[in-house]
Amino acid sequence: MTALDIQRIRADFPILKREVHGRPLVYFDNAATTQKPQAVIDALVEYYSTYNANIHRGIHALAEEATARYEATRQSVADFIGAPSADCIVFTRNTTESINLVAHAWGRKNLQPGDEIVLSAMEHHSDIVPWQLLAQATGARLRVLGIDDEGRLLSDDIERLIGEKTKLVAVTQMSNVLGTINPVEQIAELAHQQGALMLVDAAQSIPHMPVDVQALGADFVVFSAHKMLGPTGVGVLYAPRDLLEEMDPFLTGGEMIRRVTYEDSSWNDVPWKFEAGTPNIGDVCAFSASLDYLSDLGMENVRAHEIDLVTVAMRRLSQIEGVTIYGPRNPEDRGGVVAFNLDDVHPHDLATVLDQHGVAIRAGHHCAQPLMGRLDVVATARASFYVYNSEEELDALVEGIEAAARLFRAPVPTRA
Ligand code: 7TS
């Protein structure tokens, strides 16, 4: 059983006390964004009420304090993911911006006509569209690793498609729809054997399981603070320092320069070379509180708790007539995400009924339209879990789905 004290954790999240449509809130939309503990909310308030100032420029006490706290968060992020040093950590707005940064700053400089970028069939749009535009701009082409019927990457494709033309492999460590956990360590090794670089989209993995970026062997790792109890507006790009140094700037302007004349400019050291303009200081500083919170819980415990919840959720959903669950059957092979459909009930209708029961899920294509095509559906419902979710909350999910089944199932025609 789980080592997390769920009731104690729940008490730290003020939003969980509220009701929705007269029912207790059951928040199962954590893959979209997570709720924030009081410690993170307090850290934001503390920033704006006690040390708000612009960073890296003022010679006054507040500016020095804000700079120190912002840079201390960079170190906390490095420690949390096992990065060798804080200068491997670039702050962006979100995972999407981190991927765009790599596509522009590394991709435009290094790709040529005929080069290949290998993705997987379960990527989020933010790990597809930047590469598509990069391919169009450089003459490179995209290759896509296929999946089997349980939503696992085809190992034959991994062997076949990663070859000497490959310059970059960009794969999610955990699918936001199927929950599949991909063998990114092995893929990174194959990519490196071919002289290619590896980008790991860790938006759904770093918040939910222990991840050590050095053990992964990836060149770029990207994720978002808001999916791990932190504020919105903060993303991370991890890359080894020498790789960051070789890259061109992405956004340009203040902060990222060393010297500017009308003829030419030179760049600041990494990681500041990639942080143009005033960054999201308050949210970065508050992100530190969410990292502390997760570290105190222990990422092994977070992972174990989600395996428990997914095991029960899959068992209970599969007992409901007409429910199809997507992704790996073995809960150990997946993260805390269960995507499903109920007969031909539209997932939006299902989500509306669940909302009436106080249960927040996501319904739609989950920013993974090509994957929907592969699953041969237009959309799915999706329940996604986190540290404050309990087994008891699954009752409300099951009751809501059963209510939707009663509501939408065509009545059996009676004989005249
Ligand atoms: N990559 C994956 C695997 C994701 O799940 C998401 C967001 C992103 C990238 C983009 O993150 P962002 O912070 O830049 O928006 N996924 C979802 C989701 O599943 N529902 O809403 C957002």
Image: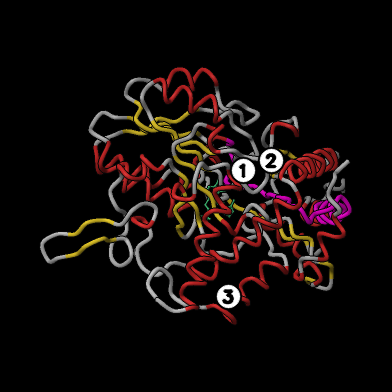
Q: Which mark's residue is nearer the viewer, 3 or 1?
A: 3
**Residue placed at 64% from the left, 35% from the top?**
180
Report crowding for label 3: few under 14, some 14 to 19, many 20 or more residues within 10 A (C-alpha): some
Ligand 1 within 8 Å of disc 2? The answer is no
Front position among marks 2 and 3: 3
Q: Label 3 amino acid?
A: Tyr
* Mark with earlier residue (1, 2): 1
Quadrant of the drawing holding the N terminus: top right
**Residue that label 1 marks:** 205
Which residue is pictured at 59% across the width and 36% down the height?
A: 375
Would residue 48 be found to the left or right of residue 241 on screen? Answer: right
User: Of the numbered discs in the image, which one, if any, rests on residue 115?
Assistant: none
| Residue 182 at x, y percent in the picture | 59, 31
Q: Earlier in the sequence, mark 3 or mark 1?
A: 3
Q: Read off the residue under disc 3.
A: 47
Q: Quadrant of residue 351?
A: bottom right
Q: Kindly tell me whether residue 322 is visible in this rendering.
A: no
| Closer to us: 389 or 272 | 272
Image: magenta residue range: 375-402
Q: Relative to residue 53, is residue 293 depicted above or below?
A: above
User: What amino acid type is highlighted by mark number 2?
Assistant: Gly
Q: Mark 2 sits on what residue?
A: 335
Q: Quick check: 219 left or right of 379?
A: left
SS assignment at label 2: loop
